[in-house]
Amino acid sequence: MAGKITVVTAAGQGIGRAIAERLRDDGATVHASDLNAALLSDFAGGHAAALDATDPDAVNAYFTAIPRIDVLVHAVGYVHQGTIEECTPADWHRSVSITLDSAFHVLAAAIPRMKSKGGSVITIASVVGSFKGFPRRAAYGATKAGVIGLTKSVAADYLQDRIRANAICPGTVDSPSLQHRMDELAETLGSREKAEAFFLDRQPSGRLGTPEEIAGLAAYLASDQSALITGQAIAIDGGIMI
């Protein structure tokens, strides 16, 4: 990764943070952004900035200052918990704005800066969506399936520009976001223990994934070792899709 210029969104915590740190440690120049810039106050050895990826003007302004990109990792997402009956129009539009619209804005701004030399686009999708339906994930599954579709279209459109695009599709990963969802679900189910069991029971491996495991796959897809891989949605899920 030495000499590669990389951009990682939603890099404040969880999967995005682990990827930003891994690529930095592997020698890349990392531009890390997050809606909450305070989460990046301790991100050393790279460039940290606030970015609302749902705002196209803000996205375009951010990328204007980065004339060349070798690797883009888009990790912005939002998990709404609920069936279609429990998903209001406001919930739906928020899910689409944060997860799918942000991917459109970021990829559209980054790709022109990758065409001169080629590069690797990595989106963080999910096994929930086009791979598999999970209970109470109507909006989330729909938007993550959209991210996979967008990623595959980019792979097809820009192959001749030597731009690869792949989606990483995690199962359940232990992160601050997951802990927050457990807290929310505990209120519905009546206890924290039931909420934890709800998430763990869907992992055939018997354990949650770690952000660092996702970062390892991202580092491979970012590197030239994966030069023949494009247009793929890669599950890293502890056996969910077996």
Image: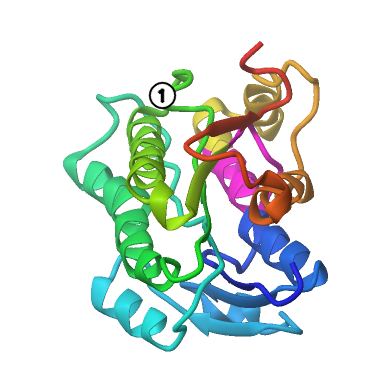
Q: Residue at x 51, y 68 (%)?
A: 117
Residue 26 included in the magenta stretch of the image:
no
Q: Check the image and name the residue furthest to the top.
A: 242
Residue 180 included in the magenta stretch of the image:
yes
Q: Nearer the viewer, residue 47 or 193?
A: 47
Q: Check the image and name the residue furthest to the front.
A: 160
Where does the image place residue 69, in percent across and percent down from the top left? 51, 72
Q: Nearer the viewer, residue 14 or 110?
A: 110
Seen in the image, is 71 located left or right of residue 131?
right
- Is 208 placed above or below 110 here? above
| Residue that badge 1 annotates | 130
Q: Check the image and name the residue furthest to the bottom.
A: 65
* Amino acid of disc 1: Ser
- Is 62 placed above or below 2 here? below
Quarter the C terminus occupies? top right
Where does the image place residue 46, in percent across and percent down from the top left? 68, 83
Where does the image place residue 2, in percent across and percent down from the top left? 76, 73
* Start-end of magenta stretch: 169-184
Total count of labels: 1
Q: Residue at x 29, y 30 (%)?
A: 86
- Is 140 placed above or below 15 here? above
Where does the image place residue 165, in percent across and percent down from the top left? 48, 47
